[in-house]
Amino acid sequence: MSVSDELFAEALKVMPGGVSSPVRAYRSVGGTPRFVKRALGSHIVDVDDKRYVDLVCSWGPMIAGHAHPEVVAAVQQAVADSTSFGAPSEVELRLAQAVVARMGGAIDKVRFTCSGTEAVMTAARLARGITKRPLLVKFVGCYHGHSDSFLVAAGSGVASLGLPDSPGVPKEVAGDTVALPYGRIDLVEELFAERGDQVAAIVTEGVPANMGVIVPPEGFNRRLHDIAHAHGALLIQDEVLTGFRLSPTGAWGLQGAKEGWTPDLFTFGKVIGGGMPLAAVGGSAQLMDYLAPEGPVYQAGTLSGNPAACAAGLATLALMDDAAYSRLDATADRVSAMADEALESAGVPHRINKVSNLFSVFLTDAPVTDFASASKQDTKAFSRFFHAALDAGLWLAPSGFEAWFCSTALDDDDLEVIDAGLHKAAQAAAQG
Ligand code: PMP
């Protein structure tokens, strides 16, 4: 029995599924989750002292690698002055300024929260408060956190576990969320023609990455923006996962910034907290000032804008200059090409969807454009792929419905381990 096996057996007694977040439990791939002891740079070390090259990056935040000396120093300095004040702090202000400045005029103000879930929940409340309308429009397979309104045809763990929706969400609440298949602008138009005057906001991931990565059809997000505006609704672009990752200005930098349109509200998380619990809503001063205490829409948090979290985020953003993004993009190109080549040579049908440095590997022979096509992947083959990769020292997301995350810490030695591991994984996937 490994130490992970022992700890997991204990954890199952005091935590549902032995975990604090469902996908970590390995339910869709089987086996015992590895308990992590420490992580440094591109490596994770488990409690049995096995090392892995990390291609999950804590589901996105660890873009500059684990325990980066500058992030650690910033957090150490912050916590030496106390872990929480429950009052404004300079580091919080500096992070707000950094996020606003980096978004290049797309937003004027931010409100910090402790999780992406809260950020999207707040954005939705703002949109409903501002428009005085009830409906939210989302897309099947997109994940916007686990608040009631968004556990409707959600992606990520909900999809991995095959739970279409969640008990405990009142049907009255779920009934105010309309979920449409991703990419179907015709269905968005139809919905707005019928109920456009009731829609508060369209909520979408800048690039969907929670049913695996889906490449948005050309002009799709721009059309969402235009349709929402034509009907007096808002567009909320959820960049919790893509923000400050896909480019210095996230998914918007690849789309709206080039095409000349801006979502009304953004949500950010993951990278802006550098691995600490931190997320944000951002938008124009006019919209953001509807939030209390400036306006009537209430939102709050004991630990919101936590100084240690803000210090981690600020230090992480400071590391992500243009050279860092170029390095990240080049690394992701190499890793995705390696996965492609390994699966090709093992004769495993697969599709790779990729947008800048974010990609997914789907074990299917048909194009993946939405949740229905993502669900056609061979999940049994993925389990074999995942476990062989894990044995070979690769830390992958334990589900085929997730993105692969690279960090700037990955070096040539890591890439060799990745290449060898992916070949073993592909051979295991082939042995059905
Ligand atoms: N939105 C998106 C696009 C996400 O990817 C996630 C988390 N994966 C969330 C919201 C929720 O964030 P959190 O897990 O921090 O609540």
Image: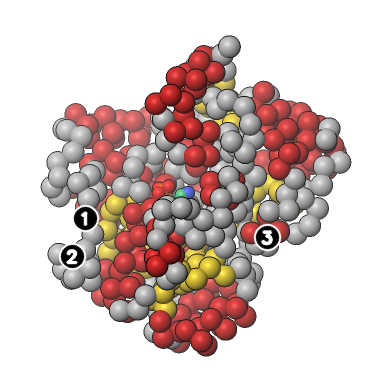
Mark 2 packing: few (<14 Cα in 10 Å), some, or many (20+)? few
Residue identified by numbered label 1: 300
Residue identified by numbered label 3: 372
**Residue drawn at (56%, 50%) of the image:** 163
Q: 177 and 259: which one is in front? A: 177
Q: Nearer the viewer, mark 3 or mark 1?
A: 3
Quadrant housing residue 122:
bottom left
Q: Nearer the viewer, mark 3 or mark 2?
A: 3
Find residue 176 and report its horizontal and vertical position in percent. 42, 71
Residue identified by numbered label 2: 292
For the residues labelled 3 and 1, the Cα–Cα distance comes to: 37 Å
* Amino acid type for the residue under numbered disc 3: Ala
Upstream in sequence: badge 3 or badge 1? 1
Find residue 133 and report its horizontal and vertical position in percent. 35, 78
**Residue drawn at (63%, 74%) of the image:** 184
The N terminus sits in image quarter? top right
* Amino acid type for the residue under numbered disc 2: Ala
Quadrant housing residue 30:
top right
Find residue 264 and report its horizontal and vertical position in percent. 38, 72
**Residue drawn at (40%, 61%) of the image:** 170
Upstream in sequence: badge 1 or badge 2? 2
For the residues labelled 1 and 2, the Cα–Cα distance comes to: 8 Å
